[in-house]
Every structure is written in structure tokens, then in C-alpha cells.
Amino acid sequence: MNNAMRLMKLGVAVLVGFVLGASTTVGAYYFLNRQTTVLVARETLQLESGIILPKGTRLTYHASYSEGFERLALYVNVPASAVSGFFDSRVDPHPFMEDPYWLR
């Protein structure tokens, strides 16, 4: 009976090791082979807030929504020393908040 328990423990350990190894391999494959869809504006676009996106602006595809719209991301790089000169800062109590703008 002692040998049977050892064999069962060994079998469970091998099974758990296989599952962990397989899931790590699959996760690493998808992480290393991920792709990003980038959309480039064909013409100058005006957002509902009055923001103008010039022709050639690159937007990163983020998600599709069942309501019938696509969410695209635009990142703006600003020198750290210039942020306080161009922007007012506030803290919002909503984590991971996104503030979308709509194309006119």
C-alpha cells in the first residue's frame, strides 16, 4: 500500500508538472508572438471635442464593441519637464479609467 501511495503521488506530480509546463509554453508563445493592429488616418479627422488628428496619425486598435464601434488608442508623448506647463492634473477615484473621444 505504501508503494501505491508513492506511485499515486508521483502520477499527480507528473500531471501537475505537465499542465504547468504546457500552460507556460502556450502563454509564452502567445506573449512572444502577439501582434498589434495599427490604423493610420487617411485624412485629417476632427473629434467631437474639437481635437484635430492630422492625416497620417497612427492609432492602435484596442477592442470591438457590440454597440457597433471600435476603440482605438492614441498615445501622446510629452517631455516630463513640460507636463505641468501644458496640463492641469487631478486624481480620479475610478481605477483604469478611460476617457474616450468620438469621431464627428
Image (cartoon, grey):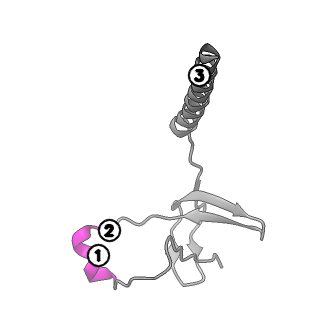
Residue drawn 51% across the image and 62% down it: 57
Residue 80 in which image quadrant: bottom left
Q: Earlier in the sequence, mark 2 or mark 3?
A: 3
Q: Which residue is more in the foreground, 101 or 21?
A: 21
Mark 1 crowdedness (10 Å alpha carbons): few <14, some 14-19, many ≥20: few
Residue 36 counted in the magenta span = no
Residue 75 in which image quadrant: bottom left
Residue 21 versus residue 52 in the image, above or below = above
Q: Which mark is residue 14?
A: 3
From this viewpoint, which residue is outermost toward the left? 81
Q: Which mark is residue 78?
A: 2
Residue 11 placement, left or right of 56: right
| CB-based contact (under 8 Å), mark 3 and mark 1 | no
Q: Secondary structure at mark 1?
A: helix
Residue 19 versus residue 70 in the image, above or below = above
Distance in Å between CA atoms under marks 2 and 3:
51 Å
Distance in Å between CA atoms under marks 2 and 1:
6 Å
Residue identifier under label 1? 83
Q: Earlier in the sequence, mark 2 or mark 1?
A: 2
In front: mark 2 or mark 3? 3
Q: Which residue is more in the foreground, 7 or 92?
A: 7
In front: mark 3 or mark 1? 3
Residue range (magenta): 79-87
Residue 86 counted in the magenta span = yes
Three-letter residue code for mark 1: Val
Q: Earlier in the sequence, mark 3 or mark 1?
A: 3
| CB-based contact (under 8 Å), mark 2 and mark 1 | yes
Q: Which residue is more in the foreground, 54 or 100?
A: 100
Distance in Å between CA atoms under marks 3 and 1:
54 Å
